[in-house]
Image (cartoon, rainbow, N blue to C red):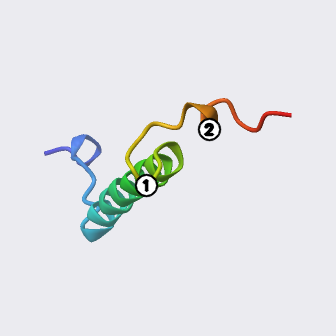
Amino acid sequence: MIKALRKPDHGANGNLITATTGFGTLGALWLGARRLFDERDRLRLDRLAGPVE
């Protein structure tokens, strides 16, 4: 097979990038949920608009 047409072999680095991206996404969702919901799992609409002056 022609070398230019072969898929590059990233080995473990490709898996590490994929795992890091997945964990970063889950972390961002978790932090967003903590900010938008209170301890009784109610949506805090006042926090969506930001601080009110």
- Near-viewer residue (49 or 2): 49
Q: Quadrant of residue 52?
A: top right
Q: Is residue 43 left or right of residue 18?
A: right
Q: According to the image, label 1 marks what residue? A: 39
Residue 53, percent from left and from top = 86, 34
Q: Tell me which numbered mark, 1 or 2, is placed earlier along the sequence.
A: 1
Task: Assign a secondary structure to mark 1.
Answer: loop
Q: Residues within 10 Å of mark 2 (few under 14, many from 20)?
A: few
- Callouts 1 and 2 close, C-beta under 8 Å: no
Task: Assign a secondary structure to mark 2.
Answer: helix
Q: Is residue 4 left or right of residue 38?
A: left
Q: Is residue 32 left or right of residue 6?
A: right
Residue drawn 76% across the image and 38% down it: 51
Amino acid on which the number 1 mark rests in the picture: Glu
Residue drawn 44% across the image and 47% down it: 33
Q: According to the image, label 2 marks what residue? A: 47
| Residue situated furthest bottom in the rendering | 12
Residue drawn 38% across the image and 62% down it: 20
Residue 10, percent from left and from top = 29, 61
Amino acid on which the number 2 mark rests in the picture: Arg
